[in-house]
Image (spheres, rainbow, N blue to C red):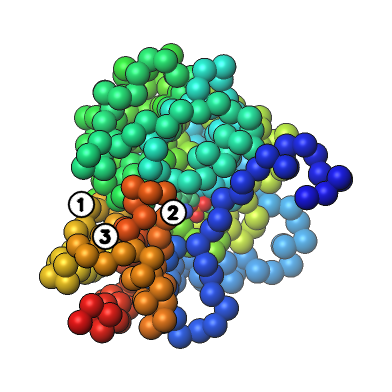
Amino acid sequence: MSQFWSPIVHTLTPYVAGEQPKQGGLIKLNTNESPYGPSPLAIAAIKEASDDALRLYPDPTGLALRQAIAASHGLDAEEIFVGNGSDEVLAHTFQALLNHERDLLFPDITYSFYPTYCRLYGIGFRTVPLDDAMRVRIEDYGPDCGAIILPNPNAPTGIALPLADIEALVLAHPQKVVVIDEAYVDFGAESAVSLIRSCPNLLVVQTFSKSRGLAGLRVGFAMGQRHLIEALERVKDSFNSYPLDRLAQAGALASWQDQEWFTRHRDMLIASRERLSLSLQQLGFTILPSSANFVFARHTDRKGAELLQALRDRGVLVRRFGSERIEDFLRISIGTDEECDRLLDALHQILN
Ligand code: PMP
């Protein structure tokens, strides 16, 4: 605490990111990164862009990348907004589109950055409890609100809503912005992008961090009708008029264009998830049905905190969240099959 701080700083409880360990040799299944590394075409494009041109500012509109994303979805480049990871895109979204007189709604168990942004920007919010099966029930999102944000699949549960539910939610609130955070959508959920044409109140946010293996490059994007994207541009240009640096624009564009790499690695990850889920069940874990690149699992008779520490002692990092209802769950990112086997070996030792 310091007398020099602005008053708001005293009120903030910042988001705590998952551990990025300095020592090698650990099996890192704690922050939902891709275990595979990005498309080699993305790496080549970043190397190629690492030349004298770095003395020049990047394209302030990120146009080539926006055009490529737009073309894949039958949208216009003006309907795409790019930023430094979807966290930054979400930060601008909270400020530009989710700050209204009435409360913002989101699930009680969800991405813990949402309450952090609300506090930063002074946005009133209410959380809506998940049901007994830890699912989002769209009927519980009533009219008394200023806007709504949901991840689909939800995090950290991994459970996805069908597209029909998302559509019903967006249509039920035509005067309010509904943001669908699709950080994990590529691993088995249906994207709401197809609703954008008919839904002027829908913003869909995605990232290159998970299914494209580029968490270190920090590239995320939002898709929605022009009036929503314009609001994001206004906030961005009042903050930093360069959406992405030169290397990020080059790397993300090449990654987006490598559809073959994307499909192959997404399928590999889904296969590993199914295999790991089965083995965890055999070890006595209950697993929520995951459409993400992680599973949310609870052991029948061992405490989450105990398992987290015992795994760490054996060099395997997974994640656990503090809130009471989920304190015995572990969120385990899907690794390579070899990494998953190391996790299973460690669990065998711990449980037997
Ligand atoms: N949304 C959700 C639901 C997430 O779990 C994450 C990753 N922590 C993000 C957004 C942000 O991802 P990034 O900033 O790497 O795009």
The amino acid type, in three-letter code, at marker 1 is Pro
Q: Nearer the viewer, mark 2 or mark 1?
A: 2
The amino acid type, in three-letter code, at marker 2 is Gly
- Point out residue 185 in the picture as x, y percentages from the top left corner: 33, 47
The amino acid type, in three-letter code, at marker 3 is Ala
Q: Residue furthest right?
A: 4
In space, the residues marked 3 and 2 are separated at their CA atoms by 15 Å
Residue at numbered disc 3: 297
Q: Residue at x 22, y 65 (%)?
A: 301
First in sequence, mark 1 or 3: give its number.
1
The answer to whether residue 54 shows anywhere in this view is: yes
- Point out residue 44 in the picture as x, y percentages from the top left corner: 52, 71
Residue at numbered disc 2: 322
The answer to whether residue 36 shows anywhere in this view is: no
First in sequence, mark 2 or 1: give its number.
1
Question: Which label number is shown at residue 348?
Answer: none
Q: Mark 3: which secondary structure?
A: strand
Mark 2 residue crowding within 10 angstroms, few (<14) / some (14–19) / many (20+): few
Q: Mark 1: which secondary structure?
A: loop
Q: Nearer the viewer, residue 291 or 329?
A: 329
Q: Residue at x 54, y 75 (%)?
A: 21
- Point out residue 221 in the picture as x, y percentages from the top left corner: 49, 44
Residue at numbered disc 1: 289
Q: Nearer the viewer, mark 3 or mark 2?
A: 2
Mark 1 residue crowding within 10 angstroms, few (<14) / some (14–19) / many (20+): some
- Point out residue 66 in the picture as x, y percentages from the top left corner: 51, 43
Is 309 on the left or on the right of 63, as rendered? left
Ligand 1: does it lie within 8 Å of the C-beta at label 2?
no
